[in-house]
Image (spheres, helix red, strand yellow):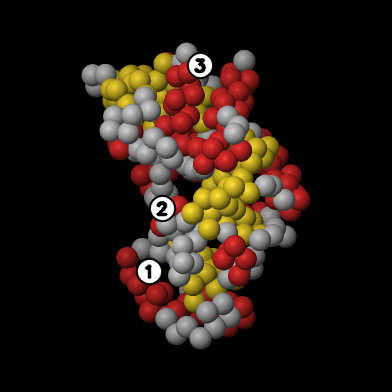
Amino acid sequence: MKIAFQMDPITGVDINADSSFRLAEEAQARGHTLFYYGPDQLAYDEGRIVARGHWMTVQRVAEAPAILGEEVLVDLADMDVIWLRQDPPFDMHYITSTHLLDRLKGQTLVVNDPFWVRNFPEKLLVLDFPDLTPPTTIARDLQTIRAFKEKHGDVILKPLYGNGGAGVFRLDANDKNLSSLFELFTGFSREPLIVQKYLPDVTAGDKRVILVDGEPVGAINRVPAKGEVRSNMHVGGRPEKIALSDRDLEICEAIGPTLRDNGQVFVGIDVIGTHLTEINVTSPTGIQELERFDQINVAGKIWDAIEAKLA
């Protein structure tokens, strides 16, 4: 098959951590041909969805993870599979790329399905499962946010469409910075804020559970660095081996059909204690860490699911 990856620069990835690299490596091992392009190179051109990019070979070499051919223009309808793998922010540029890729429906399999990536923002999809999530409010109104904080005391405040732990603040019952943070966020963005009740269980870790076509395949535990409230590996969180709990399986059973029925093949959910906090569909991570901890081929399971859909 011909496989295209729409992603951030592949030449700078960490070969021991990047999930897109691992997906490309597994596809290449199966005999598939790889094409790479950045989201800025995606275009609509007189009825065609095209991209300017490079045929590539990936290799487990830290300084040169990909060997790229000459830049060429391709019609993406000629691809068998396109991976939508650029990282957020989930802004209008990101949303526009999902609209363009949507136009390939019925011609090329886009993973994850761009229509539902657009309509399943990670911090909003969880609202469909209120019995699984911590108390939450989403607002751009300071009075609403202040009332939520007064009710719950200790809260986490973050931008609704942020990623990688950026802009995440813990405001405990004695913190007086809510108004200042609200002014800061609303001064440079028109997006609402999301506020959730602080979960003390986060000190033991924020579990990333990976689902393939709606079924859980394993989890890693991300433990915050000392003095840090965020557990994201981008900001120093430490990955640890961990098993799926009964509660994890209950959460996956509840959300799995929604993901599977809407073309979300590779998903990473975040679970703190017994609560679901995010459903990551845009560019989830954690494949390589889980493979090392559990000695399983997660990338292989993902490609098995994709090849079954094409068959």
Is residue 20 among the parts visible in the rendering?
yes
Residues at marks 2 and 3, CA–CA distance in whole angstroms: 30 Å
Seen at 38% across and 48% down, the residue is 92
Q: Quadrant of residue 268?
A: top right
Q: Is residue 216 left or right of residue 95?
A: right
Instruction: State the SS at label 1.
Output: helix
Question: Which mark identifies residue 63?
Answer: none
Left or right of 226? Residue 278 is right
Q: Which residue is mark 3?
A: 30
Residue drawn 42% across and 81% down? 177
Residue at mark 2 to residue at mark 1: CA–CA distance: 21 Å
Q: Residue visible at 39% across and 35% down?
A: 15
Q: Secondary structure at mark 2?
A: helix
Residue 170's place in the image compared with 295, above or below, is below
Mark 3 burial class by Cα count in 10 Å: few <14, some 14-19, many 20+: few
- Residue 148: name its quadrant: bottom right
Number of the label disc, if any, that sits on residue 185: 1
Q: What is the number of the mark on residue 234? A: 2
Amino acid type for the residue under numbered disc 3: Arg
